[in-house]
Image (cartoon, grey):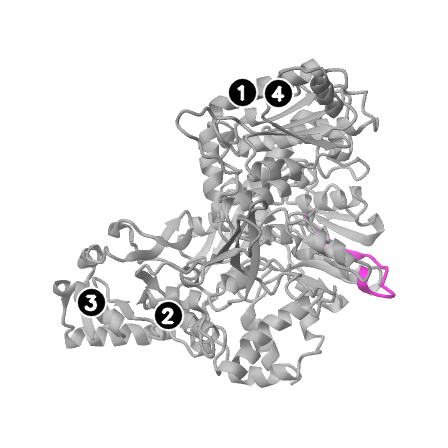
Amino acid sequence: MPRRLKMAEEFEPRIVAFLCKWCSSAGSDLAGVSRMQYPPNVLPITVMCSGSVSPLYILDAFNKGADGVLVSGCHPGDCHYIKGNYYARRRIALVKKLLEFIGLEPQRFQMSWVSAAEGTKYTKIISDFVEDLKPLGPQTKLRRNQ
Amino acid sequence: MVNIEDLRNEARRILKEGKVKYVIGYAKNQNGLMPVPVFVKDPEDVEKLIWDPTCIHNLAKFLSDEKKRKSKEKKPDERPVGIVVKGCDSRAIVVLLQEKYINRDDVHILGISCEGSGVIDEKKLAKTLKGKKAESVDLDEKGDFVVSTKDGKIKVPAEELSAERCLECRANYPVIYDILLGDKTRKKVDAPFQSLDKMESMTEEERWAFWQEQISKCIRCYACRSVCPMCYCDECVVDTINFAVTADTSADEKAGRIKWIEKSPVPSENFVYHLVRAIHLAGRCIDCAECERVCPLDIPLRFLNKKLEKEAKELFGYDAGFDPDEPSLVSSFKDEDPEDFIR
Amino acid sequence: MDKILSKKAFSQWVKMLQSFRIYAPLRDDDIWTYEVVKLPEHIDLDFLTTALSPKKIIFPQKEVFLEFRKTNEDAPEIKEVLPEEDPTIIFGVRPCDAKALTLTDKVFGGDFDDIYYWKRRNHTILVGLACNTPPSPNCFCLSVDGSPHSTDGLDILMTDLGDRYYVESLSKKGDELLNLGKSLFTQPKSTDKKDKDKIQAESRKKIKRQIKDLKKVPPKLMGMWGSPFWDEEAMSCLRCGICTYMCPTCHCFDINDEILSRAPLKGRRVRTWDNCQFPDFTMHSSGHNPRPDKSSRLRQRIMHKFQYFVECYQDYQCTGCGRCISKCPVGIDIIEVLEKVRDYGS
C-alpha cells in the first residue's frame, strides 16, 4: 500500500483487523448500525473464529504493509465453537512474543475480546489503536518493498 | 562412561535377530573430523558405529525419510528401524510420537548419554586449535574433552568446547529409549534459557538491527528446514516447492495454491519464512540447533526457536519433547493461560 | 605484461581505481563473502574460501528482467530492465572461481547470448589471487583440469611473494588497470620470476585431495542410470540444497512474476536461482515428477557435472573448489562418490 505523505498531511495508520464472525465482527456491525463515530483506519476481515487466524495471516498483513494488526474474538467461554478462542489466546501470545523479540514495535500487534453487544468497546479499541500507531509512523520493518 | 562395544553388540543383536531393518548411527568420516550418518543393514558392519563428542547430528530426521519411503512402497517392510540418539535427539522422537507421525514400534531407540558434557561446537574447536587439525575428540572420565592432533593431545574443559545449546541442556541423557548407555544422571541447569539473556536485554532497535542484518544474509537455501526433524510437512506452507500433487489434484487446486511469499531472497520475504517456521515449531522445537549448524551463512537461527521454547515454558508451563502422551502446545490450552495482553 | 607491486603500494593502487565499483572478500565473524568495498584499507587478501563465489556478482540470485503496468483497458506496458553497466572490479578471485565463470560463459553464451549475464560480465574485471596454500582442506582443482595458479577466466593474476605481489596481466582490461597505477608497479627481476615459479610449483604439491583417472568417470556414468548405487549414496542426503547454491558453476534458474499491485496492475518479472536438489525442481503441471526422490536428484547432479556437460562442452562442470564437501551437513563427499563411480562394477 504505497502512500505518499505530503508535508501537511498527518500520517493515517492502516490497521488490518481479523474479526471473528460471531462476536467481534457483529460488534463492529453494531457500532456501525448505531452510528458510533470512530476512525476509518480499519480494514476488517471477517474470519469464522479467532482460533482460525493463522500466524501466516498476521505476518502477511505486515508483509503487505499494514501498520497495525488486530485479532479480535469472543470472550473466553463464549466462543461459538466452544474452544476456538482459547487456542487463539495461546497462539497469539506466542506470535506477539516473537514479533517483539525481533524488534517490531509491540504496539503494532494487538488482540482483544469484543462481544456482539460491545459496539462501544470496539470503537474504543480502534480509536486507542490508531492513537497508539500515529506516533510510530508507517510500518517499514516487515513491509515488502516496492 | 559409554562403552562403544555395548552399542555395537546391541546393534548386532537386533540386526541378527531381524528385529530391525537397519540401524541409523554415526560412522567415521574418511575425510575429516566430523562423523557421517550411516545406515547399517549387515550385522557384520556394526563395527562402523562410533560414539564420541563429535556426533552432533540429529539422526531423527531420517525417521521421516523412512516414513516417506514406506508410504511409496506397495508392500513395505513393517519392521522398525534402530536409531542411535542423544538426549536432544530423543526429544525429537518424543515430539514425533506426540504428533502420531510415527508409532512407538516404528523405532528401536539406542540411547546414549552425553554424560553432562554435551557435544562439540566446530567453530569453538577451530578457535581452540588455532589452525591445527583435530583427528579425534574423546571424553575422559572427568567429563573433559580430549582433542588429539598430530602434535599430541590437549585436554579442554567441556564448557569451553561444547555447543551453546549443551550448556543449557535439560536432557543430557535420552528421555525415551530401548537401551541406555552411559551415565544416567540428570544435569542440573540453573538458567535454562540464559543464552537469550543478552538478546532480551537489548533495546527494541538493537534487536531489530541485529535481526535485520542476519535475515538479510539468508539465501533461502532451505537447509534449515531440510535438516529439522520436525519439518516433515509434504507441502511447506510458506514455499510451495514441495507442493504435493497427486492424480486427484485438480487444475484449480494447482492454480489456486497461495503464494504467500515471493521466491526472491529479499529481507521482507525471508522474515516471513523464518518467523512462520519458528511459530510452527513452537512447543515442538527441542533445540538440537541443527538449523543453525547447517546454515551456510551462519545465521543464528537457534535464538528464534529458543525464544518460543522459553515462552512456552514461562507462559504455559510447557516443555517440548519430554512426554509422548502430552498434547502439543498449540492444540491444547489451560483456563489459566495468561491474557494480560488482551484488551 | 608482468609487474611487481609491493604490498604497501596495493591500497594506493586501489585508491586510483575509485571510478570502479570494487568487490573484495570481507569477513563477518567466520564467514568471508564478496562485498562492495568502500575503503581500500578494508581489502584483506589473507582469506580462505568465501561462502559464495563471485558468480553472485555477475549472475545475482535475484534480478529483474522487465516491469509491466496496465493503466487502462489497453495492453500492458512492458519496460525492459537491463543491468546497470557499472565498471566493476573483483579482487581476490580464486582460480577455481574464475574458471567456473568460463564454464557459465559457455552456458549463457554460445548460440544465444544472455544479455543480462553478459552486460554484467563484460563490465567486470577479475583480479585473481593464486592459492599459495589450498584455501580449503577439500580443494581438488588439479583433478578437474584446473590449478591453484590457473589464469583461465582472469584478467589479472596476483601471486603473493611475501612482501610483494607478482602481477600478471592477461587481457586488455588487465593492462588498463595496471596502467592506471603505472608508477606503483616495477619491473620484475629474474629472481622474482623464479620465486613465483617456485611458489606456484609448490602450491600444486600442497593439494592433498586428488581423484585419479577422473576421465574414466564420464563413460562409466553412461551405464549407471538405473543403478541402485544412487539409492545407497543418497541415503543420508537431506535435500537441503546447500551444495548447489554454494557451487560456483551451478546456473539453473527460475523465472517468476511478482505482482506489486493488482489494480492498477503493476508487477515485474524476476529471475532467481533455482536448485535441482529441491523436490519441486522437475515437477510437471500434470503432477508427474521425473525426479521424485533424492537418489534421482543426486544422480542428476553428478551426471550433469561429469557426463552431460562433458558431452556438450568438453569440460567438467566442476572446478574443485570443495565448497560442497565442506558444507554438506551429512558429509556427502563428491570426491568419494566419483571414486566409487570410477571403480563401480570392477
Residue at screen point 46% across, 77% down: C144
Looking at marks 2 and 3 on the same chain, the residue that comes earlier in the sequence is marked by 2
Judge whether B120 appears above or below A34 on screen: below
The stretch drawn in magenta includes residue B72: yes
Mark 1 vs mark 3, CA separation in Å: 60 Å
Q: Secondary structure at mark 4?
A: helix
The stretch drawn in magenta includes residue C292: no
The residue wearing badge 4 is A126
Judge whether C12 appears above or below A106 on screen: below
Magenta span of residues:
B71-86
Looking at marks 1 and 4 on the same chain, the residue that comes earlier in the sequence is marked by 4
The residue wearing badge 2 is C95
Residue at screen point 26% across, 70% down: C173
Mark 4 or 3, which is nearer the eye?
Answer: 4
Does the CB distance between marks 4 and 2 fall below 8 Å? no
Q: Secondary structure at mark 2?
A: helix
The residue wearing badge 1 is A132
Mark 1 vs mark 4, CA separation in Å: 10 Å
Q: Decide if residue C266 is on the left or right side of residue B85.
A: left
Q: Secondary structure at mark 3?
A: helix
